[in-house]
């Protein structure tokens, strides 16, 4: 191969490589522009850690999942107010940023939310007012409260049955002796039987006597 041909090939390779870098930078620049300020973005997911101003634009519909972490409940609410297109939400509570209480309209702006995940909180307790708050989510189909414990009543199971929601947890219903039950705590399957409901994934929970 002549020297001139080798030189021409090298020039072509360098040109292609330079074009590839420029194109990648343009894609990255466009990607960074659509990521909210105070958030970290990756593909169709984002994690937000800072309060959002009312004047901030809504999170773009290209994002499906949102994780809220290192935030107070007040700061988290400002993020959710900008998330009408988010379909999956995970709220992470830490010892520094505890979610001990939720305002009743906490999820009200999340019109597209289908999946809500609450990983085990520091004290293994759901926030006060959690039930009234989630009742305002119009399209919820999957609720996972992780290892958080629930008071011994059938409210969550009734809610799941009425709305056709798949409800799951890894903890137990506790304090049951106080309400006249034989044991002080029950797992989800056992307590579902006691309440007369069967929770089935991807299907509506229905009273057992309806079969």
Image (spheres, rainbow, N blue to C red):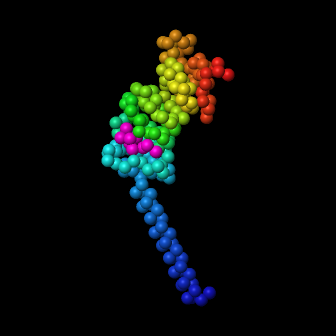
In this rendering, is residue 32 above or below 51? below
As for residue 108 lying within the magenta part, the answer is no
- In this rendering, the count of numbered labels is 0
Q: Residue at x 53, y 23 (%)?
A: 158
**Residue 150 visible here:** yes
Q: Quadrant of the C terminus?
A: top right
Q: Is residue 193 left or right of residue 53?
A: right
Q: Quadrant of the N terminus?
A: bottom right
As for residue 78 lying within the magenta part, the answer is yes
Q: Position of residue 35 (x, y in %)?
A: 41, 52
Using the image as rendered, state which of residue 196 and residue 139 is in the foreground: 139
Q: Residue at x 48, y 20 (%)?
A: 151
Q: Quadrant of residue 34?
A: bottom left
Q: Residue at x 51, y 15 (%)?
A: 176
Q: Position of residue 153 (x, y in %)?
A: 51, 19
In this rendering, is residue 9 above or below 159? below
Q: Is residue 70 left or right of residue 65?
A: left
Q: Residue at x 59, y 89 (%)?
A: 2
In this rendering, is residue 24 above or below 71? below
Q: What is the span of residues highlighted in magenta in the rendered image?
A: 77-85
Q: Quadrant of residue 29?
A: bottom left
Q: Position of residue 110 (x, y in %)?
A: 44, 39
Q: Position of residue 208 (x, y in %)?
A: 64, 21
């Amino acid at each position: 191969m002549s020297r001139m041909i080798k030189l021409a090939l090298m020039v072509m390779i360098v040109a292609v490589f330079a074009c590839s870098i420029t194109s990648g930078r343009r894609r990255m620049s466009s990607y960074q522009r659509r990521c909210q300020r105070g958030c970290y973005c990756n593909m169709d997911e984002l994690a937000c850690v800072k309060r959002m101003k009312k004047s901030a634009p809504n999170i773009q519909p290209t994002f499906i999942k949102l994780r809220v972490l290192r935030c107070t409940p007040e700061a988290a609410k400002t993020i959710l107010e900008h998330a009408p297109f988010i379909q999956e939400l995970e709220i992470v509570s830490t010892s520094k940023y505890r979610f001990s209480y939720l305002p009743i309209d906490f999820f009200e702006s999340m019109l597209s939310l289908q999946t809500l995940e609450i990983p085990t909180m520091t004290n293994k307790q759901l926030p006060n007012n959690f039930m009234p708050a989630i009742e305002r989510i119009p399209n919820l189909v999957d609720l996972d409260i992780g290892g958080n414990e629930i008071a011994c009543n059938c409210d969550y199971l009734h809610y799941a049955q009425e709305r056709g929601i798949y409800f799951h947890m890894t903890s137990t219903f506790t304090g049951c002796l106080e309400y006249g039950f034989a044991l002080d705590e029950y797992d989800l399957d056992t307590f579902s039987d006691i309440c007369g409901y069967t929770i089935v994934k991807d299907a509506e929970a229905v009273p057992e006597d309806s079969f």
